[in-house]
Image: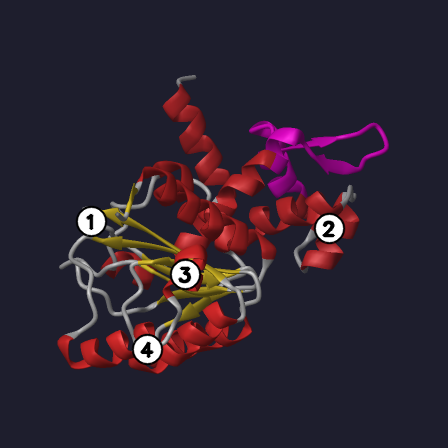
Amino acid sequence: MSGTERLCDLLFEVSNEDRLRILTRLEEGPMNVTGLSRELGVTTQEASRHLSRLGDVGLTEKDPEGFHRITPYGELTLVQIQDVGFTSRHRDYFRTHAMSGLPVEFACRMGELNDSTFINDVIVAFYNVDKVLREAEEYLLNINAPYIASTFPLIREAYERGVEGRFIHTRDFAPHPVMEEQYRRERGQMPLNRLSGLLEERLVDSMDLVLYMSEKEVAILAFPVRDGSFDFHGFSSDDSRSHEWCKGLFQYHWERAEPKR
């Protein structure tokens, strides 16, 4: 059997909802057919048939006492399915937003965002940014997030608290003309020696995502729509796995960006 045939067999077996439920349940511990059928609400004949198919592709195995267990291969498959599960759950978003700028090593781990919250309201996204700014105690990480007038005082206050900031942005990044004067005024109120010790900026030619986060939570992770513009729909989170994924993504781009001189 070729590698492609094996893959198709695997995808076919886990595409069945009952078989996937059985596999997920067996991840918690071994069970016999009767227990599985009762817990999952299927007949014993159906449970037996599904277990036979899962066993045929190596996802489960039966011990001498008649209990079915998930195999290490089955456990690994469930982990990898999380990535597809996340993208399929948010398929309407990923159908209309471009992901070509996301490094492959992060695209392959998108299941780590499973516990994040989908945001489809720009007002909520900007509210989250305000909240993160108010509550940050250690650091702020920013990739290409736009200047928002309401955040200018909050940014200044964060630096006055000693919060460190790292900011990656494109070379042509600037406040909107209607906010430029306020931005200059707010920045001018900060002692330059203190600002230079807390704020680091790096430059890139282009960037296909927006990210704003602190040591506590991710305010917004957003990708562009197909024409390259941003509607600021995306994901927020305060769970550790999503946070580490986003922090790693920031570090990936930080290491490749050019220090601002």
User: Residue 95 at x, y = what percent?
Assistant: 26, 57
Nearest the eye: 33 or 92: 92
Residue 59 vertical placement versus 148 (above, below): above
**Disc 3: which residue:** 193
**Distance between mark 3 and mark 1 Cα atoms:** 29 Å
Seen in the image, is 94 located left or right of residue 175?
Answer: right
Q: Which residues are magenta?
A: 48-75
> As shown in the figure, which amino acid type bears the numbered disc 4?
Glu
Secondary structure of the residue carrying numbered label 4: helix
Instruction: Determine whether label 2 and label 3 are within 8 Å by CB.
Output: no
| Residue 206 numbered tag | 1
**Disc 4: which residue:** 186
In the image, what residue occupies the spot 66% across and 47% down?
47
Nearest the eye: 84 or 230: 230
Counting residues from the start of the chain, the first of labels 3 and 4 encountered is: 4
Counting residues from the start of the chain, the first of labels 2 and 1 encountered is: 2
Seen in the image, is 190 located left or right of residue 247?
Answer: left
Residue 51 vertical placement versus 155 (above, below): above
Q: Is residue 46 visible?
A: no
Secondary structure of the residue carrying numbered label 2: helix
Instruction: Determine whether label 3 and label 1 are within 8 Å by CB.
Output: no
**Distance between mark 2 and mark 3 Cα atoms:** 66 Å
**Distance between mark 2 and mark 4 Cα atoms:** 63 Å
Instruction: Determine whether label 3 and label 4 are within 8 Å by CB.
Output: no
